[in-house]
Image: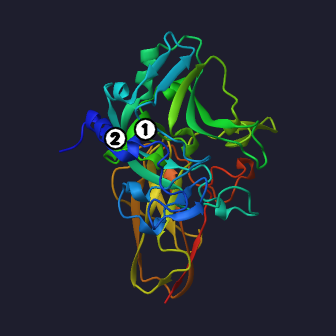
Amino acid sequence: MPLTRRDFVRTALATPFALAVGRAEEPTKPAFPGLIVRAHEPRNLEFPVSELRDVIVPTEQFFVRSHFAVPQMDAKTWRLKVEGAVAKSLELTLDEISRLPSRSLTATIECAGNGRVHLTPPVPGLQWGQGAVGNAKWDGVPLAAILDKAGVKNSAVEVVLVGTDTGQVNSDPKSPGTVHFARSLPLDKAKKDEVLLAYSMNGEPLPLSHGFPLRAVVGGWYGMASVKWLQRIVVTEKPFQGFFQTLDYSYFERKDGLPTLRPVTAIEPKAILARPGLHEVIQERSYRVFGAAWAGERAVAKVDVSTDGGKTWDAAKLLGEAKPVQWVLWEYVWEKPPRGPASIVARTTDDEGRTQPATRDVDRRSYMINHLVPTPVVVR
């Protein structure tokens, strides 16, 4: 029998994990032994895409992205504050949030720097392979419901999500001292159905590594918008110019030939290979090429596969219904592959006709990495 939203909260409140202050998992150990450690502290763990089996990534295998140390959280004392350009400021407990009408959302979260290891020349930042991405089922309260409860003023333009996690960024560009991780959403995005304040992940209370007791899940946008350990919602009357959407998590957009900084937002179309792996030796005469594809706020229309580095393409089969904000699995059966070296690459096109570019756009800095990256293999 599935848990109700009240059951989720009761379970969380009843466990030592939830009640303990600062009892996060040991920061030098992965939450799951198969995860790839990209940084010990703050903890950053990558999902090994070769382990992809189902459309939902198990919680213990879901990638972990942390900008600062995991904060100390206590469900008994935690409150969500809603303030700014609202008719009524709020301070809500987890139990009060759990009483509001809930909904489920299956959504893919991808780190904006996923695939950074493939950039040439190398750039600073976590050197993610292709596994800083995952698809999960989230349960919680629509952000729109919280905004409606507070009463958003007509003058409001954005909603700032503020996490409990804090720290100082000492790499270039440096932060102005200690800052909270915070990102804003335009008001129209904040009110959409795909924006959730989640307290459950894959049918269980939200783990600390993934934002317990409450996190944002912003469907269709890169993961930096899905703020974890949420503590404040600030409705603003002017665009928010915070550190993590101006100096960091930003890219250049050219207008009239002039580059202008823009915050990273919607996920670009992308496909990844779960098999074959890099430099895999293929001996089967009928080989199943397999992976996942997604297109942010749009649905995947098709996936094409090339076995000659992008010279020619064949259609792959989608293994399920393609929907916005979540990935779809796909396969391509490679019959009688010719012996010798080969280069396999997959390409996604969304339902608006946007497809992955062959080469990297340097104006994207170290983010939004979706150019085609062939996987070399050998057929014997």
Instruction: Please indicate whether residue 107 sits to the left or right of residue 231 in the image.
Output: left
Please say if the residues under marks 2 and 1 sit with CB atoms less than 8 Å apart: yes
Q: Is residue 141 visible?
A: yes
- Residue at point 42%, 83% (across, down): 336
Q: What percent of the width, then of the height, locates residue 9? A: 32, 36
Give the colour scheme of this rendering. rainbow
Kindly indicate the quadrant of the structure image that contains residue 20: top left
Residue corresponding to mark 1: 213
Q: Quadrant of residue 75?
A: top left
In the image, taking residue 252 as reference, residue 275 lies left or right, namely left
- Mark 1 residue element: loop
Q: Residue furthest left?
A: 1
Q: Amino acid at mark 2?
A: Ala
The answer to whether residue 269 is above or below residue 92 is below
Q: Tell me the residue at 66%/50% (across/down).
A: 367
Label annotation for residue 12: 2
Return the x and y of residue 267 as percentages of the image width and height: 55, 45
Q: Nearer the viewer, residue 42 or 1?
A: 42
Q: Is residue 352 above or below residue 134?
A: above
Quadrant holding the N terminus: top left
